[in-house]
Image (cartoon, rainbow, N blue to C red):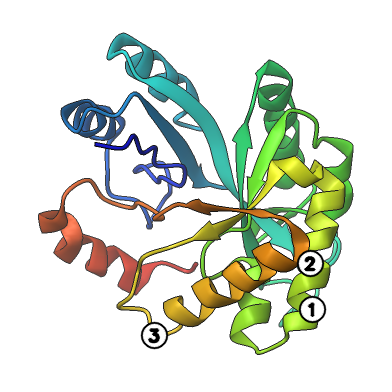
Amino acid sequence: MAKFTHLHVHSHYSLLDGLAKIDELVSRAAELGMDSLALTDHGNLYGAIEFYEKAKKAGIKPIIGVEAYIAYERMQDRRPGIDDKRYHLTLLAQNNEGYQNLIKLVTKSHLEGIYYKPRMDKDALREHSRGLIALSGCFAGETARAIQNRKPDQAERIVREYQEIFGKDNFYLELGAHFNYEDQKVINEGLEALSKKTGAQLVAANDIHYVRPEDAEAQDILVSVQTG
């Protein structure tokens, strides 16, 4: 069996969004024979230390990350009806420098960028990009939104901007498999086209919010009340 690592994973520390406890995530990964696992909670690193320690104890390589909220323009902006919207971006620490930069970015997002959600902007990303790998994100990612809106030129510009911020080899286009969402196929096809055009590599990531399929009903209840 080919090895696979989940790189976009939410725990109960993604408030009103994730269902899985850290213990459950680590146990399930071990049960499936996975040798590594990421944790990318929404806008915070609350579970990072617990996850790191428990994953190491289970013989699983922990990958520390966050699903960041990216401000529409500047993280300091507070315009009703505009800045209460934001994009998602998956960030992963590649090394200790990346982890330190992740801490700085999350701290800034809570101290300077908080507006409905703790947001960061591209200027902050440029300042603290070293040691980080970025994935284009889920349906709420900036690239995916441009594809959904049938704006291929804008999507290409966004990809190239993130390649400039993180380095061409450190920005990936995130394919998902949530085909109950009607635009998933459209987004994936758009990402594949962008990969050929920009050289950005594709990566499979499935935006995990629960551990087992039978947890899906409870997850649907959470999704119905989340604010995104």
- The residue wearing badge 2 is 158
Q: Is residue 37 left or right of residue 85?
A: left
* N-term-proximal mark, 1 vs 3: 1
At horizontal 53% and vertical 29% (from top left) the residue drawn is 64
At horizontal 37% and vertical 57% (from top left) the residue drawn is 16
Q: Is residue 93 above or below residue 146?
A: above
Question: Residue 194 appears in which quarter of the rendering?
Answer: bottom right
Question: Residue 110 appears in which quarter of the rendering?
Answer: top right
Disc 3 residue crowd, few under 14, some 14–19, many 20+, Cα 10 Å: few
Q: Is residue 77 above or below residue 190?
A: above
Q: Nearer the viewer, residue 52 or 159?
A: 159
Q: Amino acid at mark 2?
A: Ile
The count of marks equals 3
Of helix, strand and loop, which one carries label 1? helix
Residue 55 on image: x %, y %: 35, 19
Of helix, strand and loop, which one carries label 3? loop
Residue 2 on image: x %, y %: 31, 37
Question: Distance between the Cα atoms at labels 3 and 2?
Answer: 23 Å
Residue 123 on image: x %, y %: 89, 50
Mark identifier at residue 123: none
Q: Are marks 1 and 2 in contact (CB under 8 Å)?
A: yes
